[in-house]
Image: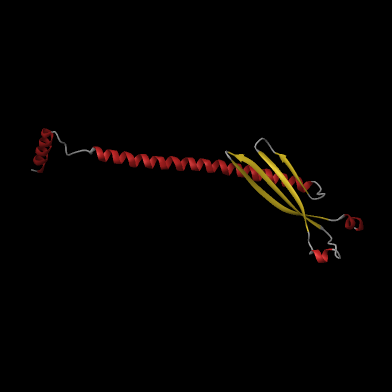
Amino acid sequence: MARILFRNRLLHSRINGFSTTGFTLIEVVVAMAILGVALTVIIELFSGGLRLGRTSVEYTRAVNYARMKMEEIAVKPLTDEGNEEGKFDETYRWQVAVKRVDLLPEENGAALKPPVQLFQVKINVLWKSGIKERSTALETYRTIKPEEYEEKS
């Protein structure tokens, strides 16, 4: 019985020219708009992930260059304070700053001489990433026996 009623309604709706099955134009347009917004968000997330991946590779390379430079400085004898600059390649460049650190306060420093001198070594690695200038830094301290103590020992 229900089958006959459904067939009669379907036949009647087609005779009048209106179909009650399917989607209206507004429903299709709204569905396409939602799909378009969702796809745009997904594409933005994907491109943001790629951009962050590239930045991570750049920082990793910069830290490796800084560690390489730090090892190079550790091997050669440290003479005095000063700044140096140079390039690793076309993209990455470095700056080294060596600064003496006073171990004793100024008022006691004249009377007492410490057995070692303390130097702060700071390495900056700079590079251009797109339109931004990025940098990373490593810092360490080195001790050196003064010449007067080396002669005594």
Residue furthest to the front in view is 107
Q: Is residue 24 above or below residue 123?
A: above
Q: Position of residue 22 (x, y in %)?
A: 21, 38
- Identify the residue at horizontal 30%, vertical 41% (top origin): 31
**Displayed quadrant of residue 9:** top left
**Tally of numbered discs:** 0
Q: Where is residue 23 in the image (x, y as percent from the top left)?
A: 23, 39
Q: Where is residue 138 in the image (x, y as percent from the top left)?
A: 68, 50
Q: Where is residue 18 in the image (x, y as percent from the top left)?
A: 15, 36
**Displayed quadrant of residue 61:** top right
Q: Horizontally, is 43 left or right of 111 in the view? A: left
Q: Horizontally, is 121 left or right of 23 in the view? A: right
Q: Horizontally, is 48 left or right of 141 in the view? A: left
- Identify the residue at horizontal 37%, vertical 41% (top origin): 37
Q: State the residue in front, 24 or 73.
A: 24
Residue furthest to the right in view is 152
Picture quarter with the N terminus:
top left
Picture quarter with the C terminus:
bottom right
How is the structure coloured here? secondary structure
